[in-house]
Image (cartoon, grey):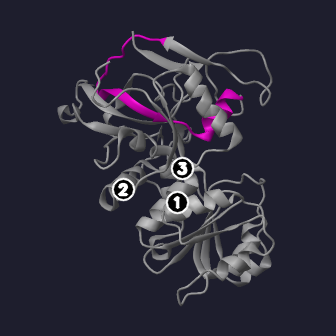
Amino acid sequence: MPKSVSISQIEGKPGKVYYPLSLDEVPKPSPKDGEVLVQIHAAALNHRDLFIRQHLYPGTAFGVPLLADGCGTVVEVGKRADSGWKGKRVVINPGEGWSDSLEGPEEKGGYKILGGTKTLPNGTLQEYMVVKQTELEEAPEHLSSVEAAAVPLTGLTAWRAVMVKCGAHNIGPGKNVLVTGIGGGVALMALEFARAAGANVFVTSGSEEKINKAKQLGAKGGVNYKEEGWDKKLLGMLTTEKKDFDAIVDGAGADIVEKSARLLKAGGVVAIYGMTTGPKAPFLMQAVLKNIEVKGSTMGSRKEFTDMIDFIKKTKAKPAVSSVAQGLDLEKINGLFEEMKKGSQFGKLVVEVSSSKSKL
């Protein structure tokens, strides 16, 4: 029988518990009207998967396949689904409930993400997965299945922050863009999108090694945010006639708005997709006087998912992959989770479920 990976319940308080992985044998699913059956080749981890195992994520469920990111081949088509999907290698939209609104999810229940919860009880860490045909995009040909699986959730989050919230007028050729906290999946995708759009991208990190790796991926330069006066040092790196930044893409929060008043042009944008340093980012008068816009950003719509995949196909952009575990081997998958716990990864952590040439 086909296999999937979920979590098993044990006693423990949220934040203190760490649910063990479970390798489950499940019936091979059959697609219903408007659905297709996808043989999964690769699935990727996100931080929410670690939070699920720690019971720190809403709607945690047991027996539901984990992970939201996936790439596979359509092997069966249900009634009223387009038969043209059969045989195509696809990437799966990581959530539902958000069609095309710029403001946010249209559905009253909000945006529901795949993997490990009861709100949308399906996930990509399984050998076969039934998906609505409306949630598929053909995988970019230049990406391997492992690379394609690394794109969906972090890519969509980065796409909305960079291309929607910052705006294309701040991201193109000749523009200076700062991506903070380089090394995580979203930050690396933000670097890749801004670079592929022609911008001069600079980064911050607490690790010189990660800064150097970012330069290898196309960053023009970077600074260690632990150093005193890192913002002044960063401005000194700008070699173009423009001596300021057009946009900042941030996942830390904290003092980024204060720093932005020094770093950004008048009317520049800070797009914040997370606050890992703390849940507050004070909006100071210096930012008001400089007409700086601070915009929250999270995930993205179905339309934005299509736009992102089209951009990747056009520009041949690629995600950074840190580590790959072969097969549904719980020990190896646990190893990926340990990397995430330590924060030692540089890019995405991916499980290669099956070869794109294999038949399960």
Please report the residue visible at 74 percent of the width from the left and 65 percent of the height from the top.
Answer: 225
Helix, strand or loop status at disc 2: helix
268 lies above or below 159: below
Give the numbered dot on residue 356. none
| Residue 261 in view here | no
Please report the residue visible at 73 percent of the width from the left and 70 percent of the height from the top.
Answer: 257
Residue linked to disc 1: 190
Please report the residue visible at 48 percent of the width from the left and 28 percent of the height from the top.
Answer: 123
| Residue 232 in view here | yes
**Residue range highlighted in magenta:** 25-54
Residue linked to disc 2: 312
Q: Amino acid at mark 2?
A: Ile
Residue linked to disc 3: 299
Q: CA distance from mark 3 to mark 2?
A: 17 Å
The location of residue 285, given as percent across then percent down, is 79, 78
The location of residue 173, given as percent across then percent down, is 43, 78
